[in-house]
Image: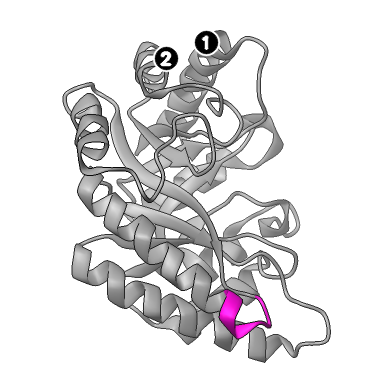
Amino acid sequence: MKLGLVTYNVGRDWDIDTIIEKLGAAGFEAVELRSTHRHGVEPGLGPAETAAVRSRFEGSGVRLLSLGSACEFHSPDEQERLANVRETARFVELAHDLGCLGVKVRPNGLPEDVPREVTIRRIGEALRACGDHAERYGVEIWVEVHGRGTRQPEAMRAIMDSCGHPAVGICWNSNPTDIREGSIRSAFELLKGFIRNVHIRDLPDYPHRELFGLLKSIGFRRYTLVETAQSCEPDRYLRYYAALWRELVRSA
């Protein structure tokens, strides 16, 4: 497994050069660029700007792994869902041009007054459309285990079963709702066949040693991406995080 960062909190105010410099110095190997943050890597970027971003990462030692969109598909409004599918397609095309492996999307809850199975079917249909487009571009869709109700492992498994597309998997999100009687094993067993990417939190607040052991058991050789609160000492924080991460992975 390899260590990376999501620029959701730590890194949200850094430009591309700062991201590469700070992650490289702390021993991080990859980054997921979260949409709307200072780096400015968004759909609509011109060809020359896109090429410049790709060139900056290539050979830097920090892989531009993925784009973290805020696209979501749970809305009862069909036009809103379709708009999010179209926006995901734009992220997919940009990810392809940048050499990224994946695009992160999400559900963001189960709307009230809509039957659970209807929302799950709608999310699955939207994800299949996204998967069709992503497959043509050689990019994966990573569905973050996210949102009120939808972050429950049983709900996410139902969404994945409804979608059933080979280009669509999940981003394990290290949620408190994974934990049952102190263990994440039951949640992991439900979702292990779909895991393409992993977000990890503050290390003392989640059974990461168990998570890393379970990931090893399925031969996971991809990235675990840090998504934690901001720090007033980000350089120091990242170095300490990397050191503890290496020890937990080694001993898992």
Q: Inspect the image, locate mark 1, and give the three-letter code of the amino acid beneath it.
A: Asp
Q: Inspect the image, locate mark 2, and give the three-letter code of the amino acid beneath it.
A: Lys
Give the alpha-carbon distance from disc 1 to disc 2, as whole Å: 7 Å
- Which disc is residue 235 wearing? 1
The answer to whether 173 appears left or right of 96 in the picture is: right
Q: Secondary structure at mark 1?
A: helix
Q: Residue at x 68, y 83 (%)?
A: 76
105 is higher (above) or lower (below) than 54? below
- Which disc is residue 165 wearing? none
Q: Residue 220: horizontal and vertical position, in percent? A: 34, 51
- Report crowding for label 1: few under 14, some 14 to 19, many 20 or more residues within 10 A (C-alpha): some
The answer to whether 23 appears left or right of 200 in the picture is: left
Q: Residue at x 21, y 64 (%)?
A: 137
Q: Residue 224: horizontal and vertical position, in percent? A: 44, 40
138 is higher (above) or lower (below) than 4? below
Which of the image's four quarters has the N terminus?
A: top left
**Disc 2 target residue:** 22
Check whether the beta carbons of the residues at disc 1 and disc 2 lie within 8 A of each other: yes
Which region of the structure is painted magenta? Answer: 75-80
Q: Residue at x 73, y 70 (%)?
A: 149
Q: Secondary structure at mark 2?
A: helix
The answer to whether 142 appears left or right of 221 in the picture is: right
Residue nearest the observer in this picture, 167 or 137: 137
Taking the magenta stretch, the answer to whether it contains residue 78 is yes
The answer to whether 159 appears left or right of 75 in the picture is: left
Q: Residue at x 76, y 87 (%)?
A: 114
- Report crowding for label 2: few under 14, some 14 to 19, many 20 or more residues within 10 A (C-alpha): some
Q: Residue 11: horizontal and vertical position, in percent? A: 53, 25
Q: Residue 46: horizontal and vertical position, in percent? A: 27, 43
Residue nearest the observer in this picture, 216 or 206: 206
Taking the magenta stretch, the answer to whether it contains residue 112 is no
93 is higher (above) or lower (below) than 133? above
